[in-house]
Amino acid sequence: MTDKATLILDGTEYEFPVVEGTEGEVGIQGTSLRGDSGAIFLDPGYGSTGSCTSEITFINGEEGVLRYRGYPIEELAEEASFEEVIHLLLEGHLPNRSELSALRDRLARHAHLSEDTIEVLQALPPQAHPMSILQTVVSSLGTIYNDDDEETAMYRLLGKMKALGAAIYRRRIGEPYLTSDPDLSYAGDFAHLAFGSPTGGSEVSEVVETALNQLLILHADHEQNCSASTSRMVGSARSDVYASVSAAVGALSGPLHGGANQKVIEMLHEIHESDKDVDTFIEKAKDKSDDFRLMGFGHRVYKNFDPRAKILKNSANDLLDELGQDDPYLEIARQLEQTALNEEYFTKRRLYPNVDFYSGTVYYALDIPTDMFTVMFALGRLPGWIAQRKEMLDEEQRIHRPRQVYVGENERHVEPIEQRD
Ligand code: ACO
């Protein structure tokens, strides 16, 4: 690969260094463009714009590859604990025994919600969407722990997030909050805090714990997606960790991002309840005059398959077998996938199931209410948001401040109101 790229603008040549990543990805380092030429690259939606170099996550969307710090997602999902993945994302390597035990102690120290936090939670409207509640309470932690240094805030939030997610769920179902059990894994403790009985000790089903552990790992990072970029963007202004993460939660809540997992199960429910078949909904998704999109399908980066969806499709099967459940939604999801993948509309646009397509069926099998699905996603994604922010701060990146091309009115002057149309 050449190490320079040349741009000719208005007859003048500008040269830019070419950066090549460890997996052969190529970027043209265009930072000097505006200073040298006065022009900018215009790329709404950032489809061809890299905001950083990163050592955290590698995705090859053409081949369906996802690796955290070089480890294939398939291996991590099978062999690691979520705590190991937290360490991997934040520190760059899988922990040895003593590092893992230190991390678990650290997370356990922060795994309770203070009275102040409970009060904030209780003050919010019970019918509010759990993602709005999560965003507000995460943000409020910045008012309570406003003296935290960066590292304390990171681990405090990692420790508290599962207690918070579980408390949001228990408030919703009208059950009292439980206390964290430091002897349980991150996934096991979440299951205990969310589903445990106040009198029943810490009995956590292994099947549920394994399924949750895998879900958390599969969601842990996904390089420069909308919410991770938000976390970096807010952090670039040197705002605190709570501000970065609450903004990232807000970004994740959107239906084109993490909110899609809720929309998928609502769509499967709609299909199940209707008297129309799967083909009718595929036709609706293809029809440009209809707003309906096949939720959980398509991805900005994956143009072949999303490896997380592949893993979850199998896990959903295994989980339902182990729980002895019959889930009508999984069958509809399979039919939708099969039908869509035989349709030119989807193959031509390279639209495949994404992580959200099957995660909903797993959450559903675990009895998690639909509007809590995106909170589960946020719980998994937290180490990614924090690792992305940490990497940006460690590199002392400048404040993120995109440019624009102004296409509005040229200068004009204020007319007295009676002269306006
Ligand atoms: N159903 C029907 N058509 C679709 C779908 C879909 N789910 N997704 C994309 N298309 C079509 C678009 O209409 C467009 O068609 P056109 O070229 O004829 O105009 C083409 O495919 C390209 O789609 P874009 O929206 O331009 O692709 P983009 O990369 O901007 O969006 C996105 C990706 C947001 C994921 C999109 O595929 C989508 O809306 N999917 C449904 C929502 C979803 O599942 N989101 C979760 C993403 S994964 C995550 O955040 C964890």
Image: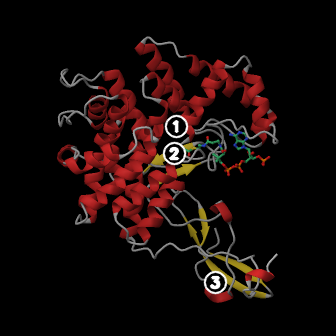
Q: Which residue is mark 3?
A: 34
Q: Splitting the image into four quadrants, where does ligand 1 fall?
A: top right
What is the quadrant of residue 392 in the picture? Answer: bottom left
CA–CA distance between discs 2 and 1?
8 Å
Describe residue 127's horizontal placement relative to residue 225 as left or right. left
Task: Classify mark 1: residues with Cα within 10 Å, few (<14), some (14-19) or many (20+).
Answer: many
Amino acid type, residue under disc 1 in the picture: Arg
In screen coordinates, is 90 left or right of 176? right
Viewport quadrant of the N terminus:
bottom right
Distance CA(mark 2)–CA(mark 3): 34 Å
Point out the tag, 2 or 3, that comes first from the N-terminus.
3
Q: Is 94 left or right of 198, judged from the image as shown?
A: right
Disc number placed over residue 156 in the picture, else none: none
Residue at point 37% right, 33% down? 172
- Label 1 beta carbon within 8 A of ligand 1: no
Q: Are marks 2 and 1 in contact (CB under 8 Å)?
A: yes
Which three-letter amino acid code belongs to the residue tagged 3? Arg
Instruction: Identify whether 145 is placed above or below 123.
Output: below
Q: Earlier in the sequence, mark 3 or mark 1?
A: 3
Q: Which residue is mark 1?
A: 308
Q: In the rendering, at what x and y percent does residue 105 appear?
A: 17, 45
Q: Secondary structure at mark 1?
A: helix
Graded by Cα atoms within 10 Å as few (under 14), some (14 to 19) or many (20 or more), the crowding at tag 2 reads many
